[in-house]
Amino acid sequence: MTTLGSELRKALDGYWHAEREKARVELNRPEFAPHYIPDVAEARKVALSQMQVLAAEGFPGHGFTEAQGGTGQIGRAVVSIEFLAMSDLSLMVKAGVQWGLFGGAIANLGTASHHDKYCRPLLNLDLVGCFAMTETGHGSDVQHLETTATYDPASQEFVINSPTPSSRKDYIGGAAQHAKVAAVFAQLITGDESQGVHCFVVPIRDNKGKDLPGVTTSDCGYKGGLTGVDNGRIMFDNVRVPRENLLNRYGDVAEDGTYTSPIDSSNRRFFTMIGTLVRGRVTVGGCASAATRVALTIAGRYALTRRQFSRPDGGEVLLMDYLVHQRRLLPLMARAYAYGFAQNELVRKMQKVQSAENPDQQEQRELESQAAGLKVAQTTFATRGIQECREACGGAGYLSENRLVQLKDDTDVFTTFEGDNQILTQLVAKELLTGFADEVRGMSPWEWAGFARETVSDVVKKYTAAEQILQMIRDRGRDVEEEGSFYDRGTQLYMFNEREEYLISTAARRMQAAMKREKDAFDAFNFVSDHIMNAARAHVDRTVFEAFIGGIDACSDEAAKEVLNELCDLFALSVFEENRAWYIEHRRMSTGRTKAITRAFNERCRSLRPHVADIIDGLGVPDLLANSVITPME
Amino acid sequence: MTTLGSELRKALDGYWHAEREKARVELNRPEFAPHYIPDVAEARKVALSQMQVLAAEGFPGHGFTEAQGGTGQIGRAVVSIEFLAMSDLSLMVKAGVQWGLFGGAIANLGTASHHDKYCRPLLNLDLVGCFAMTETGHGSDVQHLETTATYDPASQEFVINSPTPSSRKDYIGGAAQHAKVAAVFAQLITGDESQGVHCFVVPIRDNKGKDLPGVTTSDCGYKGGLTGVDNGRIMFDNVRVPRENLLNRYGDVAEDGTYTSPIDSSNRRFFTMIGTLVRGRVTVGGCASAATRVALTIAGRYALTRRQFSRPDGGEVLLMDYLVHQRRLLPLMARAYAYGFAQNELVRKMQKVQSAENPDQQEQRELESQAAGLKVAQTTFATRGIQECREACGGAGYLSENRLVQLKDDTDVFTTFEGDNQILTQLVAKELLTGFADEVRGMSPWEWAGFARETVSDVVKKYTAAEQILQMIRDRGRDVEEEGSFYDRGTQLYMFNEREEYLISTAARRMQAAMKREKDAFDAFNFVSDHIMNAARAHVDRTVFEAFIGGIDACSDEAAKEVLNELCDLFALSVFEENRAWYIEHRRMSTGRTKAITRAFNERCRSLRPHVADIIDGLGVPDLLANSVITPME
C-alpha cells in the first residue's frame, strides 16, 4: 500500500482506527477466508463453527459491560463486526442475532439476575438463543404483535401462546436449528389487562435439538442469500415459563399479578424498550457499507486490470479509463467514504449514549433517528451499489467465485430487516417534523398526521460533530461565481441545507392543508407521504455531507486531504445531480447551472482517476477479505 | 378472471395472442411448475429433462424452417419461450442455448449439408450443443477473439487452438457438462492470412461425457443464479476438424485453402453473420419482461391481501392502498405493458425480416438496433423491477418459496449476456447518429467518433407500426393548456420526440467539437460518451411509447382501452418524471409544469388503483406459473 492509500484508510477509519486495525489482525486467518457454500446444512455448520472461534477469543465480549462478563467497549464491538461482514455475511448476521439481538435483549431489557444467569453462557455459546419479535402477520407494526404471555398467579408462570396463524413467529434467525431459547416478544396480560409488548425468555429446544412440548418450530428454507443463517418459525401452544423469565427492566409482574413499571405511559415504555435495541440498526447499516466496500474493491481492482477494445494508438483500454465506467464506480466510492464518516460519528454517539448511567432522552431520540436514517441510506446503497459493481464486471461478476453476487444476495434483506426502509424513513420524518415528541412514536401515520397538524414547528434539529468547521464554512459564505462554485464547500453546504429545510417546512404545510381538505386522516397522510419521505432523505443527505466535512477536517495528511476533498465534491455533486430537477423547480439553481453540475461531476471523475488504487486501499478491506478469483491477493 | 382482465390480456398479447394462448396451454402441466433447486447437479438434470419433454412435443421446431425439420413459425418460437422464462429461467436459458444459439448458428451460418446433418438431432436432443463465442479476454469485442482455426490443406482440416490463457472460451452454457459439440467462433486463418471470425462445429465430448483429445473443459461452478445451466470453459489444444465443419454460408475455404465469400468487406461479412443471430437478443429481452411480469403478479397480488397498520376507522390497511406502495408497483406495471407492446412489434418485424428470401439491408439494421435497444431496456427493467417487487414483499419477499429472489438472481446476468448493456446502448447510438452506415459497425468507439465527425446527419430514422394513429395525434396537435395537458397524447408524443431529437443532434455536435479540441479520438469519445448513451435511451423511450399507442389503438374493448390509456399516461409520466431535470434545463417545460408531473403521476396511481387486479391478470402469467406460497393458485 502507498502512503496515500494508508493515510486515506486512517482517515476513513477515523476515531475508530485503532479498533479497526485490531479487527483486521484478528480476522486475518484462514478460518475467516471468504467462501461460498450453497448447501444450507453445511453453511449453517460453518457459520456456527466460526462463531465458536470468535467466542473462544472473547470477540463478542466488547458489546457487554464488565458486570455482564464483557469489556464494555460498545463502539469497538460495532466496528469489529464490519469485518465479519466482509468475510461472510451469514457469519455476521448469525453472530449479530446471538450476541447483538438475543444478547442485547438480555442485557438491555433484563436485570441483574438475568445477566448473571444468561450472559456468560450466551457469550461462550453454551446457550444459543434467538430473537423472536417478527410475526407472520406483523413485522413493521410491532405494537400489534399477537403472541400473548398471560400471567397465571396460581402457578406464578407466564403462558406463552400463538392464538392465530398470523401470530406465528417468522423469519427468526436461529429458530430453524441452533437456538435453544428464544427472547419472545408478546403482549403481557395480567388480571385480564394487557400491558403491551414485553420480552420473555422461553426455552424452545432440548439439548438434542428437539422442540420442547408445546413448541413447534419449522424452517424457512432457502432464501435470497444468508445461506448460513437458520431462519425459522415458531408456534407456541400454551407454553409455561416461570415468572422470572420476564425481562423486567421496564415492567414487572409481582407474584400476585400486579403490574408495575418505572415508565407510566405504555407508549413511552414500549419505545424505550425498543430504543435500547438501537445497536442492531447501527450494526446493520455499518455492515451494509462494509459489504459494499468489498464489492467496490473487487470491481475497482478489476477495472484497473481488465482491458477491452483497442486504443487508436494500439493497446487495449483499461475499463477504468472509460468515462462511463468512472461514472459507474467513482461516485459509489465517494459515497462509501461519505457513509463511512457518518457511521463513525453514529457509533461514537451510540457509545456515548449507551455508556451513560441515565442517557439524555433527547440524545437517545436523536441517536435512534440518525441510526434509522443511516440504516436506510447504507442498506439502499448496498443493494444498488453492489448490483452496479456486479454489472461492471460483466460475466465474471456473475460467477460466485468472484463474490459479488453473494455480497448482493446476502445484503439484499438488509433493506427489510431491523426495520423496513420505508417505515424507517417515515420514522425519520416523524422526528424531524414533530421534534421528538414522546407521544408521536406510537401513532399510526394518520394519527400522527393529525398530531402534526397542531404541533409542527419550523425547528430543524441539527446534529453534527463538526460544528466548528461547519461554522467556519458558513461564516465564509458561499461562492457566488457561476461555474466554479460547485467545488465551493460553502455553496455545497448551502444547497444541502436549502433542500432539507424547504422540504421539511413544506411537508408540514402540505400535510396541514391535506388534513383540512381530505375526508379522513389516512387519505391526508397518503396524499403527502412521498413528500414526507423526500424530506427525510434530504435530511440524511445533509447530515452525511456534514460528517464528510468533519472527516476531512480531522485528517492531517495533506495529500490524503486533497483526495478526500475531491471525493467529497463528487459525493455532493452526485446528490445534486440526482436532485437537480428539485433545485431548478425551487429556483435554487438556474438551468445553466444544472448543466454545469454534469460537467463538474465528469471533471471530478477525471481528476480522481489517477488515485483510484489508493482510494480503494483507503476503503480498508483487509487483503484476505478482498480476495476473489478476478482480484487475487497479491 | 373478469372480462376486463381477459380483454387486457388479449390486448397485451396483441398480434401474438393466439400463439401465446397455445403456449399457456402447453406449459400448464406439473412438469413445468415453478421449483427451487439449489443444488447445481440436480438443477441441471431437471432442466435437461424438461427440455426432453419439450423436444418430444416439437416445441423447438417453430424456430426452424420446414426444410430444417421445423415449422418456420419464428415469431411463435420467440413468444412461446417467454412462458419457459415464467416457469424457470434456467430452463429458458438452457433451451435458448440449444435451440436458439447453437441451433441458430447451424441454421443461419451453415448451409444445406449442415442443416441435413445437425438440425434433426439437435431438435430432438440426440445432439446437445453449445455456443462458444465469448472468451475470458474478450466478451463485448467479438472481432478480437483470439481462438484460431488454421486451415491445413494437406489434411483438409481446420486446427482449432487456444493460443493464450485469455483465449479460453468462458461462461459457455452447456460446456460444463451436457454439450457434446460446440459452435466455436474463431479467427479463420488460411495461407497465413486471417479472414476474421467464423464459426466451426467442433466435437468436444465423447458419448460418455469425457473430453475429447485436445479439449479441456471445466466448470464455472455456482453463479448468481441460473443454477440449472451448466456454464463452463473450453481450451483447445490444436484440435483438428474436417474442412466441412466450417459453417460456410458467408465464407468458405476450398480444398486448396482458397478463401471465398459472397461479401467482400470483412467488416460487413462479420456483422452480417452476427446479425443473423439477432434472435437471441430479441428472446432475452422478451424473457426478461416475462420474468418481471411474474414478479409483478406476485408482489401485486400480495399487496392486495397483505394488511399493515390500523386505519383510523378500524381494520388494517391493504398495502396497495398506500400511495407510496402504489408508486412502487404501478409504474412498473405500466412499463411492463409498454415493453410488452414494443416487444410484440419487434417480434413481428423479426419474423418478417427473417422469413424473407433476401432481407432488406436497411430493415435488418433497424431490426438489430431495435433489438439491442429493447434488450437493454427490458433487462434493466427486470433487474430494477424485480428488486422493487422483492422489497415490496418485505421478509416474505426474501424467501425462495416466494420466487422473487430467484427471478431476480436468474435474470441478473441478462444485463450482461447477449451483448453487455453498455455496449448495446452505444450500438443504438451509433446507428442513430450515423444512419446505419455499413462501415460503422466494426469501428472502435473512437474510430467511429472520427467517422461521425464527417458524416453525422440530422436525420433520425423512425420506425413504428402505428404510423396512422401517430399521424392523427400529430395532426391534432398538442394541448397548450398548462396543467391538464400531461394526459394529452399529443403533448406526450411531442415531449418524447423533443428529448430524442435534441439529444441526438447535440450529441453529434458535441462530438464534433470534442474531436477538434481533444488531442486524441479516445478522449473525445470519452468526453461525450454519457451524452451519447442518453441519446440512445431517449430514442428507445420514444419508440416504446409509440408502440404503446399502437397497442391501444388495436384494442377494441372500450373498458380495456380506458385502462390502457391510463397506464400509457403513467408510463409517459414516469419517463417525464425521471427526466424532468432535462426538460427544464432545455426549456421544454416550466418549473411549474414539472411539479404538475408529480401531481399527475400520483393522480394516475389513484385512478388505476381500482383496476389493479385486472391489470395483473392482463400481464398474462398463467395461474400455475404465478404460483408462490404468498400468492397460492386459486
Image (cartoon, coloured by chain):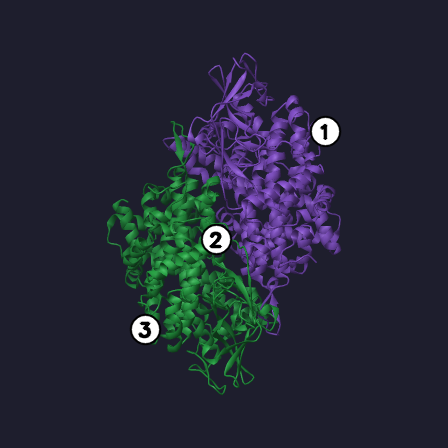
Chain colours: A green, B purple
From the viewer's side, name the closer residue of B572 and B273: B273
User: At numbered mark 3, what does the secondary structure look like: helix, strand or loop?
Assistant: loop
Q: Which mark is residue A42?
A: 2
Q: What residue is pinned by disc 3?
A: A67
Locate the N terminus of chain B and report the quarter of the image it occupies. bottom right
Distance in Å between CA atoms under marks 3 and 2: 36 Å
From the viewer's side, name the closer residue of B520 and B8: B8
When the figure is inspected, residue A598 is found, relative to residue B253, above or below; the finding is below
Q: Nearer the viewer, mark 3 or mark 1?
A: 3
Q: Chain of mark 1?
A: B
Q: What residue is pinned by disc 1?
A: B66
Position of residue B584 measured from the top left corner of the image (x, y, whole percent): 50, 50
From the viewer's side, name the closer residue of A398 and B474: A398
Residue type (three-letter) at the residue carrying disc 2: Glu
Q: Is residue B536 visible?
A: yes
Residue type (three-letter) at the residue carrying disc 1: Glu
